[in-house]
Image (cartoon, rainbow, N blue to C red):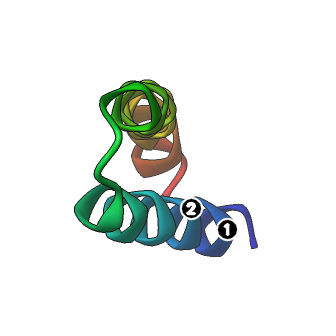
Amino acid sequence: MERYIHNQNLALLRKRLAEVQDENQRGVILKLLAEEEAKDVPLRQKS
């Protein structure tokens, strides 16, 4: 279940990043995306 939520978060953030025009919002989304991608390594090690 955690992997599913993680993958959905990544997909949503990437989609949002492609849509947003405002640089401030892009910065926030990039930060959130980087944080979510950082979680990817531990999830892969559990498998």
Q: What element carries label 1?
A: helix
Q: What element carries label 2?
A: helix
Give x and y (percent) for residue 46. 54, 47
Q: Residue 9 carries which label?
A: 2
Few, some or many residues within 10 Å of mark 2 (<14, 14–19, 20+): some
Within the image, what quadrant is residue 17 found in?
bottom left
The answer to whether 9 is drawn above or below residue 26 in the figure is below
**Quadrant into which the N terminus falls:** bottom right
Q: Mark 1 points at which residue?
A: 5
- Residue drawn at 35 percent across, 41 percent down: 22
Q: Residue 27 carries which label?
A: none
Give x and y (percent) for residue 9. 56, 61
Q: Residue furthest right?
A: 1
What distance separates the C-alpha of mark 1 from that of mark 2? 6 Å
Q: What residue type is labelled 1?
A: Ile
Few, some or many residues within 10 Å of mark 1 (<14, 14–19, 20+): few
Within the image, what quadrant is residue 2 found in?
bottom right
Between residue 34 and residue 7, name the one nearer to us: 34
Q: Is the C-beta separation of discs 1 and 2 under 8 Å?
A: yes
Nearest to the eye among marks 1 and 2: give it. 2
The answer to whether 12 is drawn above or below residue 35 in the figure is below
- Residue drawn at 59 percent across, 65 percent down: 3
Give x and y (percent) for residue 25. 46, 36
- Residue drawn at 45 percent across, 57 percent down: 13
Q: How many labels does the image show?
A: 2
Between residue 31 and residue 27, name the one nearer to us: 27
Between residue 8 and residue 2, name the one nearer to us: 8
Q: What residue type is labelled 2?
A: Asn
